[in-house]
Amino acid sequence: MTIEKRISPTLFLIALLLFVFTVSLSAGADNNKNIENEGPGPNPDKKTEEKATKGNQITLDNIISYEEELIRRLKKKQRELSYTSSEQDHKRLESEIAKLNKEISDLRHSFEQIATGVDLSAFLEQSEDDFRWDEEALELLKPVIHELKSITARPRQIERTRGKVEFYKSQLEVVKEGIAKLNNLQAKAKSRELKKHLDEIEKRWTLRQEQLSNQLTIAKLQLAELNKEKEPIIKSIQKIVQGFFRDRGRNMVVSIITFVGVFLLLRLLHQSLIQRTIPKLARRRTFIVRFFDVICQFMTALGATAAAMMILYFSGDWVLLSVSIIFLIGVFWAAKQGLGQYWEQTKLLLNMGSVREGERVFYNGVPWLVDRINYYTRLKNPDLKNDAVRLPIKELMSLNSYPFHHSAPWFPCKTGDWVILADGTRGKVLHQSHEGVQLVMRGGSRKTYMTQTFLDLTPQNLSTGFRLKIPFGLDYKLQGKITTQIPQLLQEAVEQGICDAGHESGLHRVQVEFSSAGASSLDLEIICDFKGEVAELYNKLARLVQRIAVDTANDNGWDIPFNQIVVHRADESEVAVQRVAA
């Protein structure tokens, strides 16, 4: 059963990769099959189609007649070229012949495009000289650029055709104005020679008007055809999205699944190899094991990336392949900028950096044990609830760890301890974590501190034991007994009083000592050491000791003096001493 449980994940991942690889190989065949099965859909509006067909026939007839006229003019120019002997006329005729040949070629191209209803520019191969930048980068970017151009082909074609229509309209208006002026001059001309030249110019301008009119008609027809095929923006977006997920979307999903599958498979093989081959070294986390881990993690990422790229290569999706290569180049370029940082992180992974496993580190003012260094390092503190935190390796770079003794404390208190803070707060620790500490005080009220603020208030832990120091003053008339008999009697009385109050088990010791000779009293100090089990009664015990001291003084007739103030009269004839209550 143990062997089957270990092998089953590996077999599952291998089967998954084989399935993904088979699907990716069939992607190209499916794409070709879809292209073969696609055909032009029927046009539901037959009347509109018949009307457009008639308009096309009229336009085609006009193109044919205009082409015949251009051919006649071309033959005439060619005959003139063969008879001319002037160098200047020879160059002029060659230029006109070249222009006529181009116009005839453009007319034939327009005729074929209108007759077939297909944009013939789609059959033109792009020359290699179109791209002038760095050759290697351009070869990489070409598929992406062509894909973007294909997505925006129709809007750009409509805009170009609309520009042609506006251009031909403006040119036609200019030609009409010129012909009108020529007609006006012809009507007023009296010389036969002038009329002859004006007639020749009129013929050329009339021919130019016909040419522009035909070109304008062709451009309008092309624009009408494009607008007729124009789709709503939502439908166009849907078609683009559907096309993407039909071809490239599938390739992208298969590539991502391959990356994840290979990554998990290699990680599983890595862990299996470590656990089965060198289990003792793996538990001790020696330098060899750490170095092997770093190499395996690098090779895992590299292998998963290569597998995903191979899927795109075999499916023939050069656009996604180019985008992936550009993305990888960007990643490597960014990694180059932070090479020093990555080297420091590698040192940490090899346990050779400023923070090392098994040592103690301070993070946010709290000591932590470095449990395991990885890309997300695990820090532990046994005295805190949810005693572990995950820290990115990047944050470890600013920290320093150090060896520690096993008796070193991990936090000033534990849950259930009674503490006194520098702000006077006394309470029982109800909850403590790396985020905050909550205290419950006598009476049930609660107070919460951020952990760092709590530590800044230097908490005094009463649950480990505490001492009460209570000053007690007696009159100077007892000066002969204040250092001998009175401390002993008072100490016995305090001990007996605490035991009578039921706190004998929490009392550690009592000591009474002479403290000082004050201005108006001889001061004793009552020192009581208690165990942590009576920490909750801290203030109550202080009041108890005070009461026992006063009762003992009353029982033995010891006077408790007032504070004294000495007042000197202005004439200094006599001195009066007043006793004033403090």
Image (tube, helix red, strand yellow):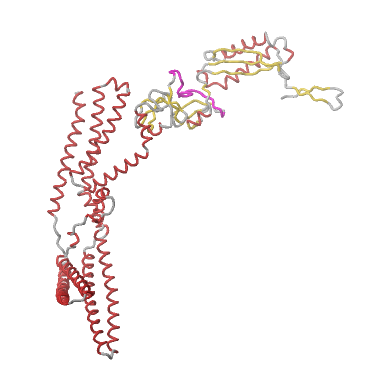
Residue 113 appearing in the image? yes
Q: Indicate left or right for 407 with 48 as reference.
A: right
Percent x, y for residue 118? 17, 63
In the displayed orientation, state which residue is furthest to the bottom.
Answer: 190
Q: Nearer the viewer, residue 276 or 545?
A: 276
Number of callouts in the render?
Answer: 0
129 relative to 410, above or below: below
Nearest the camera: 443 or 4?
Answer: 4
The span shown in magenta is 405-423
- Quadrant hosting residue 20: top left
Which residue occupies the foreground of this view, 170 or 247?
Answer: 170
Q: In the displayed structure, would residue 12 be above or below residue 413?
A: below
Left or right? Give the position of 232 relative to 477: left
The quarter of the image holding the N terminus is top left
The residue that appears at 52% across and 13% down in the rendered structure is 505
Res. 61 visible in picture: no
Q: Position of residue 329 (x, y in %)?
A: 30, 43
Q: Residue at x 18, y 59 (%)?
A: 124
Quadrant in which the C terminus appears: top right
